[in-house]
Amino acid sequence: MNGRDIAMSTVGMPASVSVRLNPFKPLDSALPILNGAEPVPWNPYGYILKERPVFTLHPLFHAGAYYVQDSSAMYVGQIFREALDRLDVKKGIRVLDLCAAPGGKTTDIAASLRLKYGDDFVLVSNEVMRQRASVLCDNVNIWGDPNVIVTSVDPSAFASMGGFFDVIVADVPCSGEGMFRKDERALQEWSEDVVTLCAARQKRIIADVWPSLRQGGVLVYSTCTFEERENDDNLQWASEDLGGEIIPVHDTFDGIRLTRNGYMLVPGEVPGEGQWVGSLVKTSVSPLGSSDISRLRPLRNGVRKGEMKAGTLVPNADWALSIDFDSDAYPMVKVDKATALRFLHRDSIVLSDAPKGYLVLTYRGLPIGFVKNLGTRCNNLHPLGRRILMDINNI
């Protein structure tokens, strides 16, 4: 079967829903949405849910306790972790997630890096489309890892950083066959010409960023299509034309197909959507370049604790969500779900028994954000762009 035939065979199948827990934001009790859930075999923090909840109405979703990510997409994280083991870098590892929005792979990579290296890593998460980069930045801030730098530049902007990265993860734009069963537009827009266009664009992206990968570093290459031209053929091209050695495939988890140069996940054979991933070790040499990430004008580079206004430090909303947040810096106020949702809706809330001044609201042990308690009411510091838009009055 060709790629499109494989994709068409999945149309009409029911879609699954899965989440991945944040290992650095432990809860004070079990997460209710995990009742009856099945573990994702290739991710120790991934779970396939029994049914799809309304995540918007879960305060812990807004607190970064978990990320909603397709289970097949999590397999890219599995190949990334295998790359880390192969490299055996002891400290100071540097990673680029090249096409990162909306942030599922970035947050998975960040968790894997922190579990293996503690605080001794740098992860640059890039998205060229500015609007999508804004969504990526929000999701990274909610996840809360301070070592993630978010940029919004063309892949060619990394070329001058010769040999800077140990690993590059490139989940490149593709013809989208793996999304046919849940995205009707992907099916309608597909054509042979689109496949040809995507395959050429993918080569350009990899060629542009190639100089920034060090000799001996690993490229993890993935798509959500089944087209050989966009998958095995492109990884073979990178190996032969750019200089790399493809990492051989090996027997893996049940349901995952082995292709010539990688792994294919097909709906119906695995619970998630369509995904392909392969990897190679760079054998060619790149001239050393600049390692100054600041010239890329990051949208996020660490987390500011706040800014001074009229002699007072006004806390940054993202500081409360950071895994580095100092829980002794501000009074912590536990709230129930209804109050948490009103805060996330940016409604006015009253905390008459709480101390005045800046406070951190917590829900089930996790911070959800800052308020300034004036006594009769609270000023809500939840970012306007992240406010819940749904009607919460009847919940």
Image (cartoon, helix red, strand yellow):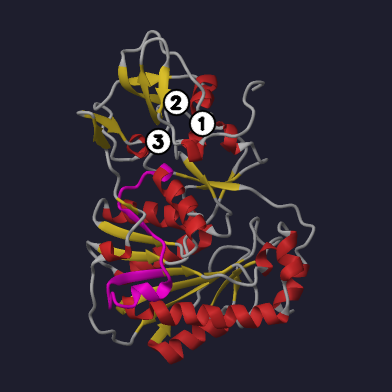
Q: Is residue 228 visible?
A: no
User: Against 212, is 62 above or below?
Assistant: above
Return the mark for residue 59: 1
> Circle 2 sits in a helix, a strand or a loop, which is it?
strand
Mark 1 → mark 2, Cα distance in angstroms: 7 Å
Q: Nearer the viewer, mark 3 or mark 2?
A: 2
**Residue assigned mark 3:** 26
Q: CA distance from mark 3 to mark 1?
A: 14 Å
Q: What secondary structure is marked by label 3?
A: loop
Spot occupied by residue 228 in the image (x, y as percentages of width and height): 62, 81
Residue depicted at 37% across the width and 10% down the height: 375
Q: Name the amino acid, label 3.
A: Pro
Report which residue position mark 2 lands on: 363
> Relative to 246, is 104 above or below?
above
The stretch in magenta equals 142-168
Q: Amino acid type of disc 1?
A: Pro
- Pick the residue in front: 394 or 248: 394
**Residue drawn 41% across the image and 88% down it:** 242
The quarter of the image holding the C terminus is top right
Crowdedness near tag 1: few (<14), some (14–19) or many (≥20) residues, C-alpha within 10 Å: many
Instruction: Report x, y in % for residue 101.
Output: 50, 58
In the image, farthest residue toward the front: 310
